[in-house]
Amino acid sequence: MQQFFSQIQNLNPVATGYFRLDFHWPIDEVPRAGQFLTIRVGDVSSPLLRRPFALSAFDSSSRTASIIFQKIGKATELLSEMNPGDPIDILGPLGNSFSQKVTAMDAGKKNHIVVAGGIGTGPMLYLADELKREKKDPLLIIGCRSEHLVPYPALDNSIRTIICTDDGSAGFKGNVVDYMKSNPDPDSGTVIYSCGPKPMLMGCQNYAEETGKSSYVSLEEVMACGVGACMGCTCETTDEKKYARVCKDGPVFSGGEIKWT
């Protein structure tokens, strides 16, 4: 983890209210799928706190990193109005990655389903790309309320992708769990990775348990400090510790580690 300054290379909308920001990654430590960073937006007192963003891509040849963010508050509104060449203050990479959390046995399995919903799409695009480069032919399933929220410009056509929309305006009509249940995968050796709204994560975990598959989730919580100091992002767990810090102990967990209800 380091604090460093970089410059915005590209900033473009990828769906209604969603933007992709590319910037140069100047440090040696390579960020992995699942990890995140925090950005101090602007040099004024408001917004005071850094904001967390998951990595959505990393190009090792150009050393370009990317995030996908949703404009939902003052900080992200200011970020969406910045321009190429503008400086950004970054702290990262933070948290663990899927490659650190997934067991060697699960990593060696044949089938890998990557499930994304909402702002959780960014890190899962990065994970799908990592799995593709490892020649694991992942299936990416993206859930959105409607077609205007599908981040088409950020998708990689070489990755098998299923779009699910609640209103049926694009792809499969229904949510990601509906899709998996309607297209059953008989292989209990399949690994399911997911990031998105908590009900979606719980649905993926329940589906994995029902079908005997392995499950890993990346949690989204309000992370004020990003380094485990403020204890503002704790979640309940099933182990003897009973609680974990999402920013420090995660954000990637085995689905069975989380107490969902």
Image (cartoon, grey):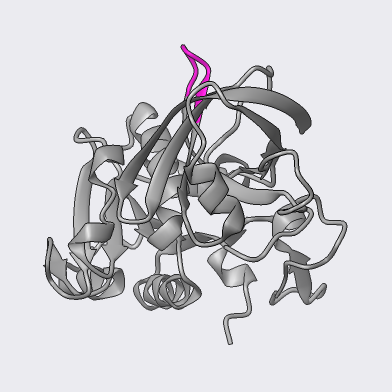
**Res. 232 in view:** yes
Quarter of the picture holding the C terminus: bottom right
**Relative to the observer, which residue lies in front, 10 or 186?**
10
User: Does 129 appear in magenta?
Assistant: no
**Res. 189 in view:** no
**Relative to the observer, which residue lies in front, 48 or 62?**
48
Above/below status of 71 relative to 64: below
Determine the residue located farthest toward the bottom in the rendered image: 261
Residue 77 percent across, percent down from the top left: 52, 52
Q: How many marks?
A: 0
* The image quarter in which residue 99 lies: top right
Tell me which segment is drawn in magenta. Answer: 59-65
Q: Residue at x 63, y 66 (%)?
A: 221
**Relative to the observer, which residue lies in front, 206 or 30?**
30
With 252 as the anchor, is 225 left or right in this view?
Answer: right
Q: Residue at x 72, y 49 (%)?
A: 50
